[in-house]
Image (cartoon, rainbow, N blue to C red):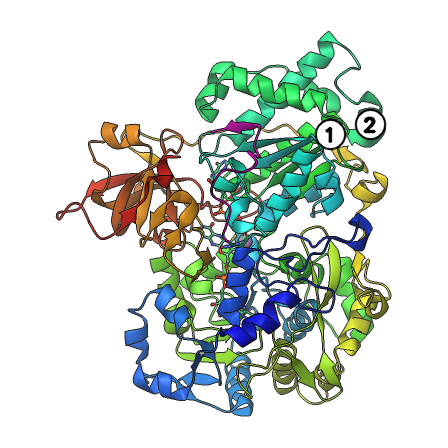
């Protein structure tokens, strides 16, 4: 991004007068936690996220004149992303082989005409990725609902949907119950299915504080993720690997999908321990006063099937008992988790078990304790709060109608997987995407791309070129927009936006860089102009005011969104404000029973036939979801390669392969009609890696063709990206030499 821009940009990351890091949703320290917002409250990967957006490379009409869409479709995501920032609106008309420039007004005309030509508003879907600001998200969902549909799928459907579903049912609120200070003051932090060293590096600073205060950390993961095993403060940009604090006191190398069985066994051990020493283990007062269905829960929890538990988890009973002892010894326990728990068939049941475990010792709604789903995108939580959800409650829809004098539909909309199915069946014919990379982030790549190409219209509001732009519908548009780092000048002056982090802190974010091009519109401006064109000049919502002054949107948010009263004033406070969370604030549980619910969940471990492995798809150190920054997965010691499959050395031998062999990865999926469906991803290189036995790992999105659209989590409908049954098939030309693997991976 150039030295001058770097010097101006990085110091403003996560500072009160600066912009929110577009990387992850880990919170910034608050003044209340002691003012320790250092000169550099950002991490190596946050810096990469900023550099990716603030690049000085540009692509305009000449670029698209040089490269046909067919040619661009042959390029990797990495190459596409490297070309630079999009600078002007482009259109691909039916029969054309190149995108051509189009003016903004003409672009909105095309979109409005195509949307109006649909048989019903429900034939369109409006996707959102989690970088969209609260202001843009609020305006966007209003536009979509005024247009007449609740088809508002988002990246969260593929991410923490399982967490939201499980938490809403059990504690009455779908978000986490801890603050940053709670995490840092915990006696015990369980980190389940998460790789913070790469995906939430600033979390390691908090875990380090836990250690300094004498707290303990348990990592449950099929992989020995660096960061957790050994850690140097990431404020030091040279990175983390090397000798440093050993963060995890206990590393439980679990089999993929074994967490439900583990959590059940832990709860069982606590209940049994309390039977032996009544009142010394469980918090009976809390259970009595605040929970529901404890008796049924305790009854079945006592009955631990150790053989089944050891088989499902791959862990030894002694280790599970050690972790149970740590739970008993801790007065303040926080459980953190991410995609290792949420992207499984039984993800919702697993997270319900996290809640059971915490409820037993009263670990919700007191300092230093609680549930901590660690969100991905920097504003994915805020977008939900603002109404980006296909199933918003009646109270919210009613509030919209009252505020704006409009009518909005009540029928639930489609989530991401249902949109894909709808496209496939010809029921969804238009996709508008506010950010993200729908084609590459969704499962079952071949099916997905066919579905997208079958659409009448695809529209992407984007900062960078990506795969979704080159899998076009009949008419396709690319609308370039401002990024988080850029100045957003409107008629009433320079604007700021607001975001909500993973711990419900809402605050302002101000871009400071000169926009990548003079032709860019902000997301708010795009929504407001499209709305005027689509809904007509007589529409009761004053869209032009939204664009002119974002305070106007915030005033509406204050009246519509619960917890956002006095929004304009409170987001201007130095640290913003914290959204209400009844379980956290007052041990009030707004569930159907009016209490926190214990639940009974029965593990159904995935059957892996002989000669097969259970594959998870995950992130390397050098990517942000579908955006590939580089080809180094440094902490895992893998260089210059992304088409790799990590397998335990003993499994490689047992399957008759060798480290370095080239294979096709073939997924096997038991379809509803009983037959086995296969999907293939070719030319992956086997890498011997210390993962749990029977398990394998490959990078997302390269491995997405293997994830069947039909494989989704119960209740949350999240694609099962972390448990795909696969077999490896030899490639004719074996052994690839080009990719290097350093000894680091054997650590
Ligand atoms: N730099 C960077 N930061 C990011 C992102 C990025 O791509 N790059 N993405 C952002 C987004 S949107 C998200 S959602 C988060 C994702 O953050 P993570 O959830 O940390 O991301 P993944 O790479 O999917 O890692 C999943 C982890 O779960 C483990 N795991 C897999 N299966 C199981 C299982 O069955 N049980 C257990 N216990 N563990 C399992 C894997 O070994 C891995 O350590 O990160 C956010 N931050
Ligand atoms: N197999 C497998 N699949 C997965 C996952 C997995 O672990 N395994 N993880 C899932 C998860 S957790 C998630 S969150 C999804 C992610 O799915 P998405 O959110 O759809 O994907 P991203 O790669 O984050 O989107 C990147 C694109 O967003 C655009 N962009 C960046 N910043 C901005 C901005 O400020 N405004 C706008 N308008 N556009 C912007 C750029 O054009 C960039 O190309 O993928 C899911 N898919
Ligand atoms: Mo995510």
C-beta proximity under 8 Å, tags 2 and 1: yes
Image quadrant where residue 606 sits: top left
- Asked whether 193 or 613 is in front, the reply is 193
Beta carbon of the mark 2 residue lies under 8 A of ligand 1: no
Q: Please state which of residues 317 and 305 is positioned toward the viewer in this rendering.
A: 317
Q: Is mark 1 within 8 Å of ligand 1?
A: no
**Is 173 rendered above or below residue 315?**
below
To which quarter of the image does residue 314 belong? top left
Main secondary structure type of the part rendered in magenta: loop
Q: Which mark is residue 286?
A: 2
Tag of residue 141 = none
Tell me where the magenta segment starts and ends, as one range. Answer: 238-253
In the rendered structure, the answer to whether residue 285 lies left or right of residue 525 reads: right
Residue 374 seen: no
* Residue receiving disc 1: 359
SS under mark 2: helix
Quadrant of the snapshot with the C terminus: top left
Q: Residue at x 50, y 62 (%)?
A: 48
Q: CA distance from mark 2 to mark 1?
A: 8 Å
- Where does residue 567 sit, x and y in percent of width and height? 82, 66
Q: Residue at x 82, y 38 (%)?
A: 594
């Amino acid at each position: 991004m150039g030295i001058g821009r770097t010097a101006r940009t990085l110091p403003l990351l996560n500072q009160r007068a600066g912009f929110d890091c577009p990387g992850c949703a880990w919170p910034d320290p608050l003044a209340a936690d002691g003012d320790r917002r250092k000169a550099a409250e950002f991490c190596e990967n946050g810096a990469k996220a900023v550099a990716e957006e603030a690049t000085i490379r540009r692509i305009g009409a000449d670029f698209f004149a040089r490269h046909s869409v067919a040619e661009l479709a042959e390029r990797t995501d990495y190459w596409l992303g490297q070309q630079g920032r999009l600078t002007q609106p482009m259109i691909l008309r039916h029969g054309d082989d190149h995108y051509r420039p189009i003016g903004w007004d003409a672009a909105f005309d095309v979109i409005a005409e195509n949307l109006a030509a649909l048989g019903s508003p429900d034939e369109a879907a409006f996707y959102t990725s989690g970088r969209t600001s609260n202001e843009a998200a609020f305006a966007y969902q209003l536009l979509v609902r005024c247009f007449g549909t609740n088809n508002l799928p988002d990246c969260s459907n593929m991410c923490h949907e399982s967490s939201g579903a499980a938490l809403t049912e059990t504690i009455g609120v779908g978000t986490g119950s801890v603050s940053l200070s709670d995490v840092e003051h915990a006696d015990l932090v369980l980190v389940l299915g998460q790789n913070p060293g790469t995906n939430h590096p600033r979390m390691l600073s908090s875990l380090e504080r836990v250690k300094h205060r004498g707290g303990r950390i348990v990592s449950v993961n099929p992989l020995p993720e660096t960061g957790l095993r050994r850690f140097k403060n990431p404020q030091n940009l040279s990175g983390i690997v090397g000798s440093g604090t050993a963060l995890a006191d206990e590393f439980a190398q679990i089999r993929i999908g074994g967490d439900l069985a583990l959590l059940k066994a832990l709860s069982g051990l606590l209940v049994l321990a309390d039977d032996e020493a009544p009142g010394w283990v469980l918090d009976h007062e809390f259970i009595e006063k605040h929970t529901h269905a404890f008796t049924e829960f305790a009854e079945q929890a006592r009955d631990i099937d150790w053989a089944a538990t050891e088989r499902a988890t791959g862990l030894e009973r002694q280790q599970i008992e050690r972790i149970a002892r740590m739970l008993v010894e801790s007065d303040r326990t926080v459980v953190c988790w991410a995609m290792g728990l949420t992207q499984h068939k039984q993800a919702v049941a697993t997270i319900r078990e996290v809640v059971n475990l915490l409820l037993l010792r009263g670990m919700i709604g007191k300092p230093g304790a609680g549930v901590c789903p660690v969100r991905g995108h920097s504003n994915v939580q805020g977008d939900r709060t603002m109404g980006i959800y296909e199933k918003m409650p009646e109270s919210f829809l009613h509030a919209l109608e009252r505020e704006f004098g409009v009518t909005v539909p009540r029928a639930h909309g489609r989530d991401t997987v249902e949109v894909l199915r709808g496209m496939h069946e010809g029921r969804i014919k238009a996709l508008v995407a506010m950010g993200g990379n729908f084609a590459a982030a969704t499962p079952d790549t071949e099916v997905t791309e066919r579905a997208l190409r079958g659409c009448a219209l695809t529209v992407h509001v984007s900062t960078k070129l990506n795969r979704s732009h080159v899998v076009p519908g009949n008419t396709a548009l690319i609308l370039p927009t401002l990024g988080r780092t850029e100045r957003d000048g409107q008629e009433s002056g320079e604007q700021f936006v607001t975001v909500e982090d993973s711990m419900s802190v809402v605050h302002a974010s101000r871009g400071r860089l000169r926009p990548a091009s003079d032709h860019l519109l902000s997301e708010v401006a795009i929504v407001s102009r499209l709305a005027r064109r689509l809904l007509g000049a007589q529409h009761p919502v004053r869209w032009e005011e939204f664009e002119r002054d974002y305070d106007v949107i915030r005033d509406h948010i204050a009246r519509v969104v619960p917890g956002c009263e006095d929004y304009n004033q409170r987001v201007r406070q130095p640290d913003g404000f914290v959204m209400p969370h009844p379980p956290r604030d007052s041990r009030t549980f707004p569930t159907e029973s009016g209490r926190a619910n214990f639940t009974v969940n029965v593990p159904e471990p995935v059957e892996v036939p002989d000669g097969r492995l259970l594959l998870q798809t995950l992130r390397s150190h050098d990517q942000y979801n579908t955006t590939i920054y580089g080809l180094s997965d440094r902490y895992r010691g893998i260089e210059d390669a992304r088409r790799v499959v990590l397998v335990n050395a003993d499994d490689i031998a047992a399957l008759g392969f060798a480290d370095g062999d080239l294979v096709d990865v073939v997924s096997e999926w038991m379809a509803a009609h009983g037959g086995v469906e296969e999907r293939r991803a070719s030319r992956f290189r086997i890498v011997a890696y210390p993962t749990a036995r029977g398990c394998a790992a490959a990078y997302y999105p390269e491995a997405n063709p293997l994830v069947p659209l039909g494989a989704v989590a119960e209740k949350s409908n999240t694609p099962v990206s972390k448990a795909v049954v696969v077999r490896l098939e030899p490639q004719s030309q074996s052994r690839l030499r080009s990719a290097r693997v350093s000894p680091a991976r054997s650590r």
